[in-house]
Amino acid sequence: MPKKELLDLKFTISNQRIFEIFEGAALYDDAEFVFIREIVQNSIDATKIQIWKDISSGIYDFIIRPHLQTTYSHLKANSTFDIISNIKFPDDIPNDIYMNYPITLSIDWDENDNDKLNIICIDNGTGISEENLIRMTRKVGESRKNDKSFQDIKNSLPFWLRPTGAFGIGLQSLFILSDSFVIQTKADNEKPKEVIFRSAKKQNYCSITDNEPELKRGTRLILKIHKERFSKIFKNSFSFDIIDSYDYYTDKKGSIYLYKMQDYLLNELGNIEYLNINLLDEGSIKSAEQKSTTSELKLIASKLTTDFQEKLISYEKKESLPFIVYESNVIGSEIYLDFINSFDAIDLEYHQPHYKYLYFVRDIPVKDNTFGFYKSHYFGLIWNLLSPESDKVLSLSRNKLISKTKNALNGKLLYDVFPRIMPSIKSLFEDNFNSYNIPESNKSCIYFHILLSCIINENPAISIKKNMLSKLEIPSLLIESINNTRKEILATDFFDLKKLLVVSGNTFGVNNKQKFQIKQAIYNSIKEECKAENVEAIIWANQYFDVYLRWNYQVIKIFKKDESGSVFILEKNTTKEFKPVEVDENIKKQMLSGLVVRRYVSANRQNIYAIEPYCNILAVENTYKGGFEHFPYLSSHSILSPFKNKKQADEILEDLNKVNLTGDKLSDYVYKKHIDSLITDKIVENVLENRSIKNTEITETLIKKEYSILIVDFFNAIKDESPAPNNV
């Protein structure tokens, strides 16, 4: 194609619109370095397509065929199987092949102009053909549905290799940084070329130069940013670490903004596999060998579902045994799970493990890494969304997730994927127990936390191979035996415990040793009563076992509840049969007083434990309706407060104080005057649909009358409260 056809091509998107897009993304998503992400994403997309084109050509058959035969037993005896149709998941392609396609991002001051920063990204991908270059410049974001060659390649790609399709806007955003940039590129069967892209200030022109760069294949993007634009582009906000360490007089990078950029490169892009990052004269700050999840992993075994929709792989790494799950049912993703391998990994202050939870989208980490996954309590988790559909979950800047879509995906992971894969992980671990070369204690600890994860992910009736738990002892700082001379509970006995005691002390502002002493003092004050209840063990680390306890046990008695702390008796509930929570009269009054939070807010409706006599009609299974419910600690059933907030409760209390009524007459008064405004149709519907005791029929009238009695008892509990002591 003659070069003149690429001259004088004008972009159809205005610079003002580009500025609005980029500024809007930066304003709402903190996307100062989104342009770097876009540059790298474009290189990743081009690289993935080229990897598949090369594999399809057959040049890697000699590596892939034996790799697949080693991975899959059904291929071992077949030396003529079709390679392409048997590549289903990323690890079906050996790492050595991926390593042939590194991407290098280099950032340094221009050797001819010390006020300009050069950002150069080089890949070994497909390159940009002249035909695609014309398409890109004629109309940004133009659909490629009519490009048959592209569609043929795209349709042949496995889901994890398909491109994002956001190439045009990624390049256009660069004009916010500089008036021009250069792309040197070479596609198959074409000569290498150098293209200059210019902004509107330069008459909107894109042209090929006479320079023929040295490239075997792929693309080199060269962007120059003037130092004067740093403050406008990258904002004047810095982390405390940068502020504390930066000194203008000893600055070696030449600008505080380079420290900010380095922080982004390491924290946001440092986990991208096969990406080399070079910064200034310091050289490489991250090499392609420093991979995010698969570095130093030794393959132990893999398992493929019969429908080829999921693959589970067991690895060994130092003293841990991570698992990787590839699934194509939810959205097409890679799930990396690393179970707790030692009780030493538990933070004894908060009784929770030191594990990170990270999101990736198309192999690039996204800033929003807050999972809130209570079902992943016992393992670290990295979730990498790989399908092209994952583009729909990203915000405009593509470095953050859209909340609504994120919540929907999280729900699928929690309630679809986790319950399905946990038994498979357990089975694969058990089948390969003797193949793992890590210490026995680490293997047993991992198995213990796999079992916990199975149970809390809707698999309560799992079988347990107790020999794999060996002689694993759970530290007495987490749980302690009450009846035995041995303080430590063996992991083999843990799952058979019928009755437990949980001590939750008021330990604000004290150290770990003092916290433990406070809890011990609370327990010692009721030790004899606990033995009379046949309690087997005491849970000190209630936060650590919290999720397991909520799933597997129910509170049957509250021994103590005051300013010093609370003591609960839990009973294993394998049948999920409802039992009221037993409390004395004083604790009952405290709970009734807790029907409202002592502050005025727009909406803070409370739930209290399912206590008698109200629970016979009003107790319901804990279900999230509005999404912001606060259920009582370790409860599976509760009673919903009739009051929306304290203001509403105070209005009722004020009125009841004015009438000279007691007992049934007062509850009749509440029923006639207030109950219809308090107990809405949705509250009645919730009780009828989720009622804990289902063997008797109830009506709307019965529900409202029971709430009337509850309100009167609440009124009496508030009247009986003694004034709080004055703080001196």
Image (cartoon, rainbow, N blue to C red):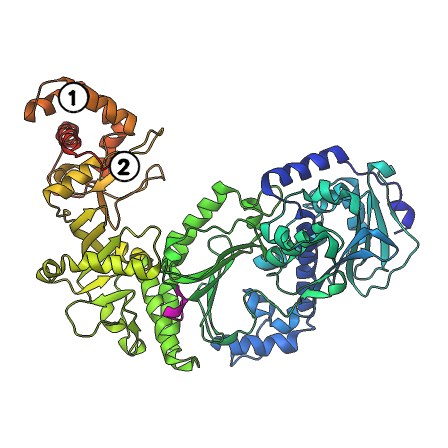
* Kind of residue indicated by mark 2: Gln
Quadrant location of residue 459?
bottom left
Q: Is residue 575 visible?
A: no
Crowd band around label 1 with a 10 angstrom C-alpha radius: few (<14), some (14–19), many (20+): some
Marks 1, 2: nearer the viewer = 1
Residue sitting at x 73%, y 66%: 283
In depth, the one of 166 and 590 nearer the eye is 590
Q: Which residue is mark 1?
A: 656
Percent from the top left, x then y, of residue 269? 63, 57
Nearer-N-terminus badge (1/2): 2
Report the magenta residues as a range: 340-346
Compared to residue 188, the image places residue 39 above or below, namely: above
Q: Is residue 219 visible?
A: yes
Quadrant location of residue 419?
bottom left
Q: Check if residue 103 falls in the magenta segment.
A: no
Cα distance in 3D space between marks 1 and 2: 21 Å
Compared to residue 242, the image places residue 706 above or below, namely: above
Crowd band around label 2 with a 10 angstrom C-alpha radius: few (<14), some (14–19), many (20+): many
Q: Which residue is mark 2?
A: 606
User: Does 401 sit left or right of 251 as displayed?
Assistant: left
* Kind of residue indicated by mark 1: Leu
User: Which quarter of the rendering shows the C terminus?
Assistant: top left
Dot 2: what SS?
loop
